Structures are given as C-alpha cells and as structure tokens.
Amino acid sequence: MAIFVDQQTKVIVQGLTGGQGRFHGLRNRDYGTQIVGGVTPGKAGQDVDGIPVFDTVADAVSATGATASFIAVPPKAAPAAILEAARSGINFVVCITEGVPAQDEARVFATLQRDYPMTRLLGPNCPGIISPGKCNIGITAGEIALLPSDTRPNVGIVSRSGTLTYQALYELKQQGIGVSTCVGIGGDPVPGTSFVDCLAQFQVDPETHAIMMIGEIGGSAEEEAADFISSHVTKPMSAYIAGVTAPEGKKMGHAGAIVSGGKGTARGKMEALRLAGVQIGLNPTEAGALMGEIVKSIR
Amino acid sequence: MDLYEYQGKQYFARYNIPVSAGGVATTVDEAVKAANDAQYPVVVKAQVQVGGRGKAGGIKLAHNADEVRLHATNILGMDIKGHIVKRVWVEHASDIAEEYYASFTLDRAAKQHLLMISAQGGVEIEEVAAHDPTAIVKLHINPIVGLSVESARRAAIEARIPAQALDGVADILVKLYECFTKGDCDLAEINPLILKPNGEVHALDAKVSLDGNAAFRHPEWDEFSATEELDPREKLAREKNLQYIGLDGTVGIIANGAGLAMSTLDVVNQVGGTAANFLDIGGGANAELMTAALEVINSDTKVRSILINIFGGITRGDEVAKGIVEAVARVQLRAPIVIRLDGTNAKEGRQILVDAGIPASQLSTRPTMLDAARAAVELAK
C-alpha cells in the first residue's frame, strides 16, 4: 500500500512538450511511473520519446485511461490546466508550477471544492509525490528514497518544503528506513492538499507505521495538523519546523513562508506539535534521528 | 510588495474608492505646490512603511504655505524607526466625525477571503482585538461567490456601524473587495475609514500589499517597484535573480531551496552564530548561479565566513562541486568557505572539491549540516 499513488496509477503530463514537462516527465517514466500520455494544445499526434501527445486532457484520458495528471506549465496557464484536468475526470493532480497568484489559487481551490470534489490537487509549487518503487510524480530524485520493507516498519513523509523533503528522505535512507509515500504539499498560501489530508491517509495506510512531518514558518497549517494529530493520529511522529530564526515580515522564498503580526512562528508551531505528542527535532538530522529511535521501538 | 500610503491611495482610486485630493512630494517646494492644489487646510504625511508615524512627528496639519514649508522641511529626511523619509503625501485635511476599520485578506486556514470590519478604527486593529475582540466582525467570503452589497451591509450592521454611514461603508467594502481580488492584493486595509460630518464615507489611510506572483498581469505595478526600498545587497541579488534577504550576522549563507536555506539559518543560530543573509539559489546550483551568489555575499562587508549548504537531488553533487570550483576561481573572496554537500553523488562531489587544490584556509568541506555550521561559526569569530 501507499497513499494517493501506486504502481497502478496512470499519469499524463500537461505540458509534456515544454522543457520542464519533458525533463521531469521522462525522469518519472524512467523511475517506473506509468506515464501514458502528454497534453499540449495543437500538438496532438506528436510524441515525446514515444509518449503520445494529445490536444486536450479529455482526449488523453479517453485514449489512455489516465487518472492522474502532472502539470508542468507556466503560472499563467496553471489554473486553467488544473480545472481542465478536473473537468476531464482526473482525480489526482500534481502541479509543480511556481508563481501562481494567490487569488487564482483560492479560486481554483473553491472551484474544485464546489464542482469537482472527487479531484485532489497537490500543489501548486510543490515537489510532487513519490511512493518509492511504485510511482514518482514531480521533481523528486527517486534514488534518494528507500523502498518500503515488507518486514520492517516504514515511514510516511509529508513536507511543505522541497529540498527539506529530499533531506528527510535522505536522513531515513541513511538509517535504512523505508518510505511508504513521501508527499510534498508545497509552500504556497493555498495548497490543494494539506498536512491534515496526508496525515489522515497515512493513519489508515497499513504500510505506514510512523510519520515524519516537515513544516515551515507562515500560516497555521502546522497548528491545524497538531489539532488533527491530537484527536486522530495514533501512529508515532517526528517533525521539524524550518525558520526559527526568520525575521518578522520577510518572505523566506516561499510565498507562504512569512511571519506576520507575531503569527506563524516556528516556535509556536513546534510547541503545538509537541503538545500533540510529536517528537520535535531542532534540525532535519535530529528529526531523522528521532524517527530512527521511533522505528527501533516499533521493531 | 508593500505600497506606500500615497501609492495605496492611488491604487484605491483606480477602483473608485473615495480618497482625499492630494499629491506626493520629494522636496519642500513640491510639497507647497501639492498643498496649493489640494486646498488648505492640508495634512503633510511622511511616506514610510512603518507604523507610528504620527507619534514620531511624521504627520502634521498645515493651514498655509508657510506651515507646509515648515513641516515638510522637518519631515523630509526624518528618521522614523530606521526608515528615512524621502517623500511626503500632502492631502486636503478631512473633518472626521467617526473612525472605522476595514480590511480584506486571504485566510489561509479557511482557504477563503476574510473581511474584517470594526466601528473602532484609527488604532491598530491588533489593539482592538486584544481589548475587545467582539468589536471586530469577521466575514468569510467564498472566492467564487464574491461579496454582495447586501452581505457587506449586514457585516457593517453587525459591526455596529451607525445607520447614517451604512450605505457609504457597504459601497466602499464592495469596491475594496474588487480592489483586493482584481487588484491581486495580499492585503487591502483602510484604517481609518472615516465618516465625515456631512455624511460621506472616505478612506483616510491605505495599506496595500501586492502579490508579486501576479505582476505579469499588472503592468501598472512597474511604477511601484521603482520606489521599493531595497538594501543594496538585495538589489544586487534581484538583478541576478536570486532569492536573497539581508540580515545582520556574520556567516554568509548559500543553500539550494528555501526550506534548506531557512534550516541553515536555524542551525547556524543553534551553534551560536548569526546569519548574514538568507539566500536560495534554487535547484540548479550551476557555476553561473554560484558565482552570482558568491558575488552578492562578497558585497556584504560584515561577512566573516561563508556556509554553502547543498543537497544534491536532480542536480547531482558532482555537478554542484564543479560549479563551486569554477565560481571560487572567478570571484576574489574576502571570507573562507565551508561546504556541506550531501545527497546524490555527494561523495564524488566532495572529491572534486578536494582535487581542485583550493587551500583549506579558503575552502573546506564537512559531512553534515551541523558540523559545517560549527566550522563556519568558528571561522566567523
């Protein structure tokens, strides 16, 4: 098992003929992901290294039976691409596009909620999702992730930050800990999928025995996660929150990573998670080491 | 991007939100001219992006040209909490019967727009929230439904806005919401929103923060970015397309990825050091980017050591190492570098750094983030 995506997942790439889409789409296929088609308006009939290209998502879905889409298009085009995927019956959309205006994200989220409740959006501005050995959608370098084990405990990872997601995968690999699924939810103000969505899935996934969470300053997603953990998550967790030293009022790279009006501080988030029973590392390595201890205790 | 008050008012005016007649001035003469155009009495207001202008003496009433001259002379060049006043906004003084508060933001937890309105304006809304939370009415707005005049009016009634101001307030709320959404604001705030003795409702201040991601559809924003106050290091970094934020410490930081860069700041702090900056060079980490990053760090005279923290993902560690070696050859560095290189092909990368034959006093590697931070902090002492 894994969450959201596995070896059965058939994926199309919206923007396959563009630089990013081609690069990551082909890498994902090399990893073993079923990349069954691409979508670029006006380029139907072409192919990218053998992957057929269609004009519309609807055409791609009816020809391939795809249920997931990987969106790698510029920010201007991303909102329409997400809604086109949802309209065409895609139920899992991964959008890596960075720089989508917050107003567009809010409208897209509200539209999905109202008109396409069966479609889950991951991102925008996220590194993607990997269920090691089964499916990799997005920009994660697959070789960093250790395959889940049949005999030993496996960890699910959920993270708001790209490189720290890799760091988390790496820390676990160093200790020989397998990963069921690693979800990068992205650092934008209105992410389609939240910590809570992922925690709920990990909690019921039989292959996931413990959960590692990487948060960062800004917003209140970590505090909401802490509330959810208190009442719904029984699996052991470790976490790291980036940005303890971030000054107030300065955006730290991600559109969502900003401390304002004394809200969204790393300390507040760590405290909330600690009260919910999560073990907190002061850096990613420490969070990884704590997870190592947790996994040993499960054994 | 945060706008100055005068820019915020100009932005409001685009959406037909009533603001006072006035003009911006960078010199005393310009201020007098703006005052004559706006008609006396006028208010001379320092344009700085920090609260507490009034208390600092940055807002003054003037009844004639001599008074404008006096106040503008005092205010221009004034230091308000570290911000030097370069411009004043001179506007016709308004008679005030009552002061309210109104703002729109995105509530990230609810994933909806949030209207906040209060009949207690003119003070920091945080203070109102602390003393009397019931005085602030919050209304969530579904972004695909929007705000109707009726809902705006209901919110105003709930906030105990008096009857004679209701029509004016509701009208402004709808226009402010349009400014917030179509104008791609992160924040659109009026404090105070005033009721004049003649019954008119009017925006006496403007606090607007724009979403930089939406700049592609707002060519009118160009003039705003021209006045943006950046520290010289941030300006240089922006020209080179680097995500950089200047800080006050002594350890220069370069990392790939925003999260990792933040994390590097934390670890440096954890081992007793202080970061000179936040710098995310993104996923690529090639020689050009690394050179640009080192140049920006090098321009900061406070930097005593440089910590490069790279996690190789798709960009492999060996490629990153080549980039670093090339960059170090191009830039005459004033501070030693400590590198932590991990992830894909990190071992090969570290070997490349060793083979480059750069003296250890200039460049050294450490296997973990914590070790590297300790070494960099030690060098910065």
Image (cartoon, grey):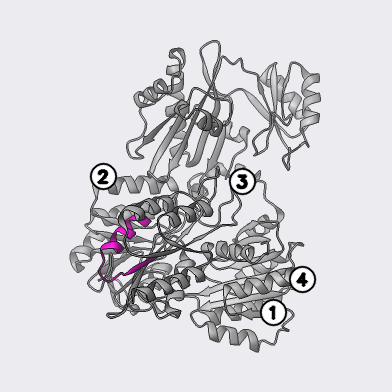
Residue A84 lies, in percent from the top left, at 28, 54
Residue B41 lies, in percent from the top left, at 70, 16
The magenta region covers A192-211
Label 4, label 2: how many angstroms apart (C-alpha)? Answer: 57 Å
Label 2, label 1: how many angstroms apart (C-alpha)? Answer: 56 Å
**Pointers 4 and 2 in contact (CB under 8 A)?**
no
Q: Which residue is mark 3?
A: B225
User: Which one is in front, B18 or A260?
Assistant: A260
Residue B256 lies, in percent from the top left, at 55, 68
The total number of labels drawn is: 4
Query: In the picture shown, does residue B70 fall above or below A39?
Result: above
Q: Earlier in the sequence, mark 3 or mark 4?
A: 3
Label 1, label 4: how many angstroms apart (C-alpha)? Answer: 12 Å
Q: Is residue A159 left or right of residue B283?
A: left
Q: Which mark is residue A45?
A: none
Q: Which residue is mark 1?
A: B363
> Residue at horizontal 24%, vertical 46%?
A115
Residue B65 lies, in percent from the top left, at 78, 19
> Residue at horizontal 46%, vertical 65%?
A162
User: Which one is in front, A91 or B354?
Assistant: B354
Q: Is residue B70 magenta?
A: no
Q: Which residue is mark 4?
A: B334
Q: Quadrant of the N terminus of chain B?
A: top right
Can marks 1 and 4 be said to lie on one chain? yes
Q: Is residue B182 visible to us here?
A: no
Q: Which residue is mark 2?
A: A114
Q: Chain of mark 2?
A: A
Mark 3 or 4, closer to the camera? 4
Q: Is residue B61 visible to us here?
A: yes
